[in-house]
């Protein structure tokens, strides 16, 4: 089933190769979001979530008692509230809830566990704002997907109440890059290659052990996690991170759903305004969250 | 999330252990179906599907242009139209289509490839009856799940048109039993243990190679298969067959969804009248089929 839309996205990415300097990389990811203007009916509001920069979005039909806490991707070194704004807002619309997108601290300035600490601060901000954990969906893409799992593991270890469900898009959960798709899909993935991931991992780890389950949740015992939706594309080097995470969750008696979208690339949802498969994935995630939250 | 209903099913199974004689085993599986009477609104009709005994079911709201061809489980040596009747009828109701359940030939009297030949005969029977392939869902549980994949691979190899989608419940796709869950879940699985599977495999293989992709579709190149839903329980030794099949399908660019149901045992759908998780799984499969068929 060839998809003409994804070919246009590939061409767009190819026309804007990733620059070598970090500041330029961060700008590039934010600039990609200019392809996806925010619909006029979305209301946004900046907020400090226990000291972490954050942004609310809401649409008219959003249930104010339900919220999605969103952790953007960008390999722990880039990505922002800006880069993911339109996608997060649309995900909230499909899920019928408000969203709180978190601008957590980035490496190399702030290596592990800064991002994890900020994610936890964001979650506590929601609790202190009166949200019931069973009405919080925790979500993230790529590095933010790994962070989603690590955040729940930290909450579980502290005997804190877990969110009602979690949603991971193309999660990065193995910072040693041992998945077979890392080479098997290298020829077809226009964005995520092993040398780039090694750079990112080095910046985030800052000497920490990449097998630490809070860094590579693939190695965690996932017992007790809430219903989990994992979505990934079949044309990405991180495919096996999703498949192996689903297997680990299944083995640990988690209610896990893995959805693989043929020919889709890493976090194709970002291009949902141009890509029917991106809209389908957001729609499926919305259904999942509506059904899973109390 | 402990499930009291599944504990009652476990007790039921424990109270009726599998007898050593083949004829008694076959009777036992049919007798289990007495726990699940057929709802009065289901109409059934026996038919010869190109020489293979088969049964139509339909409910009032079924779209007569859509059909689910169902291949029951039972390790290629037992199971029947009778044993799976109530579950197949309910699956058809949820999917909004007619069903055709197939009484394919069983081993050891009829080893590989008899069952596969009969499955193909059933599919051709639907085509010659005027069904469009895009309106056929192919489905099966356990051995029937493996047979579902092998049937599509055979159609693909012959350049025949494939069904519109496929649904596998707890599929058995590795007749060498190499999955980690084969031992990892042995303590908790009340039905499917390795020595039993070895007996079944021997009967079906009759000397054939267990790594033949038509016998263990885990080893097949799955490229070109239609959208595929795989459902399995987290408390079954065959869990890894599902996870690995999903991984192989994902790698081959198939639109695959894997759903894992915590604490559920092998083909728990059979007990859907007693088990909410069985009804949820049939409901999810119905949604999948309604969306996937033309």
Image (tube, coloured by chain):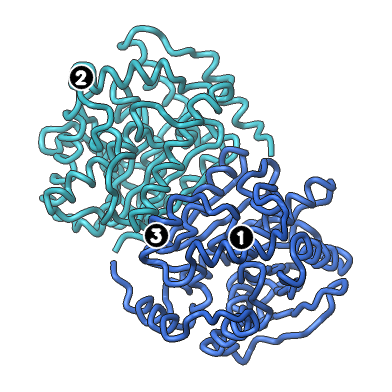
Chain colours: A cyan, B blue
Residue B138 on image: x %, y %: 69, 62
Mark 3 belongs to chain: B
Please tell me whether mark 1 or mark 3 is closer to you in this view: 3
Q: Is A129 drawn above or below residue A46 in the view shown?
A: below
What is the secondary structure assignment of the residue under circle 1? strand
Q: Circle 1 sits on which residue?
A: B167
Q: Circle 3 sits on which residue?
A: B185
Task: Tell me, yes or no, whether dots 2 and 3 are on the same chain.
Answer: no
Q: Is A9 drawn above or below residue B37 in the view shown?
A: above
Residues A118 and A81: in front is A118
Residues A192 and B202: in front is B202
Q: Residue at (20%, 38%) from the top-left corner?
A: A119
Whole-angstrom CA distance, mark 1 to mark 3, is: 23 Å
Q: Is B106 drawn above or below residue B181 in the view shown?
A: below
Q: Residue at (68%, 35%) from the top-left corner?
A: A2
Whole-angstrom CA distance, mark 1 to mark 2, is: 46 Å
Task: Tell me, yes or no, whether dots 1 and 3 are on the same chain.
Answer: yes
Task: Bin the neighbour count of mark 1 within 10 Å (Cα to Cα): few under 14, some 14-19, many 20 and up.
Answer: many
Earlier in the chain: of badge 1 and badge 3, it is 1
Whole-angstrom CA distance, mark 2 to mark 3, is: 36 Å
Residues B50 and B277: in front is B50
Residue B28 on image: x %, y %: 57, 84
Q: Residue at (44%, 13%) from the top-left corner?
A: A18
Q: Which quarter of the picture shows residue B130?
A: bottom right
Q: Circle 2 sits on which residue?
A: A207
Mark 2 belongs to chain: A
In the rendered view, does A209 fall on the left or right side of B61? Answer: left
Task: Bin the neighbour count of mark 2 within 10 Å (Cα to Cα): few under 14, some 14-19, many 20 and up.
Answer: few
Residues B198 and B291: in front is B198
Please tell me whether mark 1 or mark 2 is closer to you in this view: 2
Residue B46 on image: x %, y %: 78, 84
């Amino acid at each position: 089933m060839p998809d003409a839309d994804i070919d246009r996205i590939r061409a767009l990415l190819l026309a804007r190769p990733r620059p070598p300097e970090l500041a330029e990389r961060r700008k590039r990811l934010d600039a990609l979001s200019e392809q996806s203007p925010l619909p006029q009916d979305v209301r946004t509001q900046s907020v400090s979530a226990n000291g972490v920069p954050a942004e609310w979005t809401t649409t008219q039909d959003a249930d104010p008692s339900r919220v999605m806490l969103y952790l953007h991707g960008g390999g722990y070194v880039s990505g922002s509230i800006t880069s993911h704004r339109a996608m997060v807002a649309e995900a909230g619309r499909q899920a019928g809830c408000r969203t709180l997108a978190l601008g957590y601290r980035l490496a190399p300035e702030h290596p592990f566990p800064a991002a994890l600490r900020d994610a936890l601060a964001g979650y506590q901000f929601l609790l202190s704002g009166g949200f019931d954990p069973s009405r919080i969906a925790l979500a993230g893409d790529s590095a933010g997907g790994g962070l989603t799992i690590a955040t729940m593991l930290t909450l579980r270890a502290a005997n804190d109440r877990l969110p009602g469900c979690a949603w991971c898009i193309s999660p990065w959960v193995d910072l040693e890059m041992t998945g077979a798709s890392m080479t098997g899909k290298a020829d077809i993935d226009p964005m995520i290659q092993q040398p780039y991931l090694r750079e990112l991992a080095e910046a985030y780890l800052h000497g920490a052990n990449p097998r630490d389950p809070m860094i590579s949740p693939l190695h965690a015992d996932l017992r007790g996690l809430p219903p989990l939706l994992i979505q990934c594309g079949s044309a990405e080097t991180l495919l096996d991170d999703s498949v192996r995470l689903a297997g680990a969750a299944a083995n640990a008696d988690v209610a896990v759903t893995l959805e693989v979208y043929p020919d889709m690339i890493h976090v194709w949802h970002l291009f949902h305004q141009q890509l029917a498969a991106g809209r389908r994935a957001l729609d499926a995630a919305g259904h999942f969250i509506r059904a899973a939250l109390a």
